[in-house]
Amino acid sequence: MSSSARSLRLALIAGAVLSMGPGARAERIDPTFPLRRAVGAPGGAQPMFRVDAARTGRARAPLPTAPRVIWRARVTGGLDLPVVVDARGHVVAASPMSQLVELDLNGKLAWSLKTGSSAPVQGPVITTNGTRLIVTGGAELWGVAANGTLRVRRSLPVPSVRGAVPPLATRDGGVVLSVVGSLLALDASGDVQARATQTDPVVTLLEQGGRTLIVTERGDVLEWKPPREPTKLGSFGGRVDEGAALSSANHLSAVVDNERLVDFKLSTKTRHVRAVSTDRLQGPPAILANGESRIASFSGLMLGHDRTGLETARAELEPSSGTTASVPGMFQPPPLVVDEKGRVAFVRPGLDAGVVLESGEQKTAAGAACGDPLSLAPAGPGRFVVACRSGLILMIGQ
């Protein structure tokens, strides 16, 4: 077969797999693949939801100053879980059609894997050794290597999994899960190392100082240090729907009751209201390197505050004439992403994605709109990715 014919054949095969057809890779574990037990923080542009184990939403490389659409791709069957991005700029997405898909730096299909008969309900997350992990509704853990080879398939010790609590990739190379009234700490092989009871619905798992921090829907803050059971540290003083972030080594920050931004001090177990708004606020906050926060409101207003509560930034992310895209009860846009320079990436339903520069000037990427944005993630130097519930994925670059 000629090289051109072989290339054409490979392109046709890749197109068929990206369309989620029956030609997707069958499940197969390669017994010759060594499982590396790496330790340290997971690498990549966004190895887990909100970038890191502190859930700061802060990109590790600068966001673009003149954004434009670099490529478009579509995952058949849509998306209902946030995407992650590895160190090469590859985007990993889990489809409700029981598929795990990876797109390369140019938006082309790298591989696709069928995840059994049950759809992913948690993840994906990239662990320290580069394994892409998802959890299915049938309580199975799947781990896939960067080349698409199945590394791990384990049944979890629960009957089923409900609720898309983002898994926490930990510095020891493992992962912490919140599943059906339980917390599970797994090692790199997927084996359960610790288990604890947690009946209140969890919204966020974070790692800080060798412990797992837990924030529940009703605003409780707990710490978990296996083999002990989780211990309550205090409360945010209201409902936390959308997660929290570590704004310093000693402070958790969250939007409470959709109306105030609250800091919880871990050492003293006390809380302080950083900001209050008459407009409904969306969390979790994005955290700059100096501890400042960036949050958006349902009406499309971006607000920034320092640790004392002083307003440091304000920008309109939607036209003053407005759209009804962010009305409560409809699809909410994903939380903001920031970088070390103070730039803010955003996307609003039906409007082009863009960046608020340090000066406050806004730059949008023409043609970068979708009506149902689900996920916003940094994707390497000068890049970020927008994933939509329809399955549309947009790479925005410089």
Image: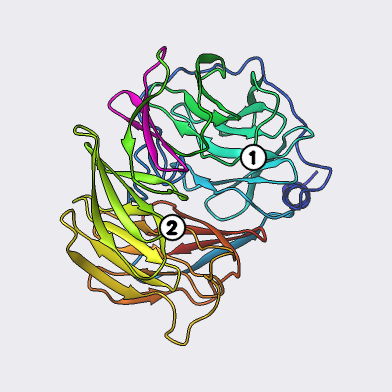
Q: Residue at x 37, y 19 (%)?
A: 225
Q: Which residue in the protein does label 2 denote? A: 335
How many residues crowd mark 1 within 10 Å: few (<14), some (14–19), many (20+)? many
Q: Does residue 398 appear in the picture of this structure? A: no
222 inside magenta stretch: yes
Q: As drawn, which residue projects farthest toward the bottom?
A: 321
- Amino acid under disc 2: Pro
How many residues crowd mark 2 within 10 Å: few (<14), some (14–19), many (20+)? many
Front residue of this view, candidates 313 and 395? 313
301 inside magenta stretch: no
**x, y percentage for residue 303?**
30, 67
Q: Quarter of the image holding residue 162?
A: top right
Q: Secondary structure at mark 2?
A: loop
Q: Which residue in the protein does label 1 denote? A: 121
Q: As drawn, which residue projects farthest toward the right?
A: 22
**x, y percentage for residue 382?**
37, 59
Name the N-terminal-most of marks 1 and 2.
Answer: 1
Q: Residue at x 71, y 42 (%)?
A: 99
In the rendered image, the quadrant that contains the C terminus is bottom left
Q: Which residues are magenta?
A: 206-227
